[in-house]
Image (spheres, coloured by chain):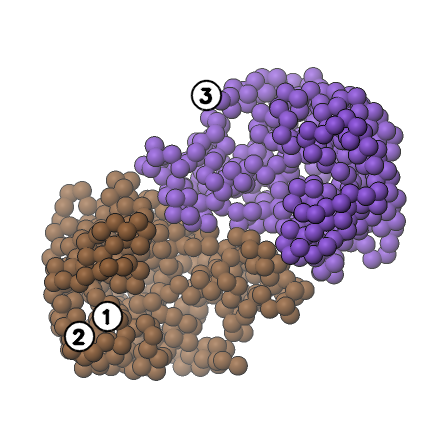
Chain colours: A purple, B brown
Amino acid sequence: MYTLIKKDGLAKRGRFETVHGTIETPVFMNVGTAGVIKGGISSVDLRKIKCQVELSNTYHLHVKTGDKLIKKYGGLHKFMNWDGPILTDSGGFQVFSLSSLRKIKEEGVYFSSHVDGRKIFMGPEESMQIQSNLGSTIAMAFDECAPNPSTKDYIQKSVDRTTRWLERCKVKMNELNSREDTVNKHQMLFGINQGGTYNDIRIEHAKVISEMDLDGYAIGGLAVGESHEIMYDVIEHVTPYLPEEKPTYLMGVGTPVNIVEAVARGVDFFDCVYPTRNGRHGHAYTSEGKLNILNKKFELDERPLDEACGCEACQNYSRAYLRHLLKAKEMLGMRLISMHNLYFYNQMMEDIREAIEKGEFEAYRKKINETFAKK
Amino acid sequence: MYTLIKKDGLAKRGRFETVHGTIETPVFMNVGTAGVIKGGISSVDLRKIKCQVELSNTYHLHVKTGDKLIKKYGGLHKFMNWDGPILTDSGGFQVFSLSSLRKIKEEGVYFSSHVDGRKIFMGPEESMQIQSNLGSTIAMAFDECAPNPSTKDYIQKSVDRTTRWLERCKVKMNELNSREDTVNKHQMLFGINQGGTYNDIRIEHAKVISEMDLDGYAIGGLAVGESHEIMYDVIEHVTPYLPEEKPTYLMGVGTPVNIVEAVARGVDFFDCVYPTRNGRHGHAYTSEGKLNILNKKFELDERPLDEACGCEACQNYSRAYLRHLLKAKEMLGMRLISMHNLYFYNQMMEDIREAIEKGEFEAYRKKINETFAKK
C-alpha cells in the first residue's frame, strides 16, 4: 500500500493508499482532538487548507463522547463528515500524561478519567476495540510512553511489555476487522518503536517489530523533553532498522525545522498541536519566520500574516485586524490564525514533496532552517 | 434614499440606498460587537449567510481598540474587510448598562470603563466623533436609555435632554461630514425615539424628532424588561408619528415573533444578539421552532438542525455532531450554530419581504407565531 516514489538522500517521497484515499508523503496530519480541530475549524475547512489526514485522539473520544455512541452513529468519518483518511492514536499517550492514579500492569493500565475521575481500564484489546468503534483508517498500537528520563532498566522492561502489547493489538485487530458489524474492516495498524534515548534498546525493538509485518511504523516517546539533538540522533539510529517500503511516523513532532530534519532522516508522517495551539495564542508561522501578532508594532500593519500565503486569513485580513481580534479575545482571531498555521504546515509538506521530487530537498531544508533560526 | 416599494397592511417593503450599497427592508442587522460577529464568524462568512448590514458597538470599539486607531487604519470597513453597510450604535446603551459610576449631566455622561475603570466622558459630540472615526454607514444619535421602570417625571426630563442631545448630534455630524479627512463624508444619522412606556411622551417626542429631517428613526428603550404586549402597544402608538418615507428601526429586538409583530406595525430595521448568543449556548432557531441541541434525544440524530435550511452547518453536519461539539465545549459548535441562527434570521427577513410583495404577509406572520408558540 506504500509506494516509494523517489529518494533524495535519505528523504523519502512516498504514496500511501488507504480505503479512505491516497496520502502523499511526507505528510503532516492535522490534529482534531475530539473529532474536531480546535479553533472552530470544520471538516469543510480542512479541505480548503489542504489537509490530507485528520488525527483524532482515542482517549478524548472515549472519555468525553463515547466510542460506542460514535460506532452506533456509523463511525467517526460519518460523525464529523470527513471522508479522507483518519489516524487515531491509541489513547496511551493521554493515559500517561493526563490521567491520575494510573497503575501499569501486564494486562494494561488502570487509571482515573481526567474529566470525572471515573475508574477506567485500558489495555491493548480495549484500545483496539475503541479505535475499531471509531472506524479510523489507521489505528495506533497501544504502548507505554515512558517518562523522560527513565532508567535503562525501566525502559527495557517497558519496551518488552510494549512488544507483548503489540502482539495482542495485532491479534485483536485481525479479529475485529473480520467481524460483520465493524465500521472499517480495512483498518490498518501501525506499531510504535520505543526505548527512550537508549539507541541500543530502540534498535533492538525496531528489529523485532519490523518482523511483525505491520502497515506502518511510528517512532514514539520523543519530543517529551529531550533536546532536539538527542531526538535527531535517535531518529538517525532507528530509521535504518525500520522497513523503507513502509511509512515511518514521528509522533507529536514538531516545529518546521524538526520536520525537515526528520524528513532528511527518512520520516514520512508527522502530527503536532503547535499550529493550532500556537495559533490560538497569536503565534503565526510564515515564510519569513514566526510572528507574534500581539506585538504592538502590528497595530496598524495592513499586510496579511504572510504575503506568500493563499489561505483565507491571508487573502482577507490584515495583521492589524488579527491583532485586534486576539486582543479582544474574539474566537475569529484564534480561528483565522489556526487555519493559517495549518495551511502553512500543509503547504510546507507540499513544498517538501516537490523538493524531493526535484532532487532539491537539501536546499529546501537549508531554507527552512534559516527562516526559523532564532534571531 | 428610502423608497417604499409596497405596503401590506402596515407592513412596509422598502429599499434604502447607502454609500455602501442597497439595503432591502425589512432587514435584520447582524451584531458584531467589536467589529466582528461573536462565534468566530468573519466578514467572508457574512456574505454566505445573507447578511446585509453589520452592526458594531461604538462603546466596545472605543474602549477596547480605540476608534482613533481604526480611523488611522482607514475606517471600520477596511479594518474588518466588509464593504457592505455598517450601522454603529451611539455607545449610549452600553454606557448605561455596562459601565459603573456614571453621572448624567446636560453636557453628557461621565463614567468608568468596564474594562479598566478609566474615567471617560461621552456626550453627543464625542459619540458623533467616534462614529465618524469608525466611518460607519449609519450613525445613531446619542440618547439616554432610561431604566425601566422610571417615573413619568424622570422620563419627561430625560426625553427633553435626549432631544437637545439630538440637535447637538446633528450639528456635530454636519461639521464632521464636511471635514477633509473624514472617513465617510456621507455618514447618515438616525434619531432615537424615547419615552419609556408613556405613550403620550413617546408620541410628542416622535413628532418633535420627525421635524428634524434625519435619515431614519429608531424606537429605543424597548425590550428592556417590559412585557411584549406593552412593547407592541408602544410601537403601535409611535409608528404613525414617524415618517413613513423613512426607515423605522426597532433597537435590540428580538425573537422571530417579536420581529414579525413589529413588521406588522411598520418597522423596517432590527438587530439583536439572540441568534449568536443563543447559538453559543446550543439553542437553534429552525423552521419547526426552537431546539436545544444539548437535549439527549439528539445524541444519535443524523438530521441537520433544520432540514429546510441551506446554511453550511445544515448542509454538512448533524444534530448529533453539533451536540457533541457543544458538550465538548469546542468552538466549532458555537460557530456553526451561531452561523445557522444568523442565516435563519436573514432568510426569515427575505421571506418577510417576499410575503409583503405578494400581499401574503398576514399568513407568514401567522406561521411564525405558530412555529414559535411556546409548546
Q: Residues within 10 Å of mark 1 (few under 14, many from 20)?
A: many
Q: Residue at x 72, y 25 (%)?
A: A197
Please state if B90 lies on the left or on the right of B11 as rendered. Answer: left
Element under label 2? helix
B199 or B184: which is nearer to us? B199
Query: In the figure, A148 relative to B297: above or below?
Result: above
Question: Given the image, what chain letter belongs to the residue carrying mark 3?
Answer: A
Q: Residue at x 83, y 36 (%)?
A: A161
Whether residue A268 is visible: no
Query: In the figure, B204 relative to A265: above or below?
Result: below
Q: Residues within 10 Å of mark 2 (few under 14, many from 20)?
A: few
- Residue that carries the numbered disc 3 in the rendered image: A375
Mark seen at residue B146: 1
Q: For the residues tagged 1 and 3, is the chain the same?
A: no
Whether residue A236 is visible: yes
Q: Hey, what amino acid is under mark 1?
A: Ala
Distance between the alpha carbons at the discs numbered 3 and 2: 64 Å
Element under label 3? loop
> At which x and y percent is residue B18?
27, 57
Please state if B65 lies on the left or on the right of A126 as rendered. Answer: left
Distance between the alpha carbons at the discs numbered 2 and 1: 9 Å
- Residue that carries the numbered disc 2 in the rendered image: B154
- CB under 8 Å between callouts 2 and 1? yes
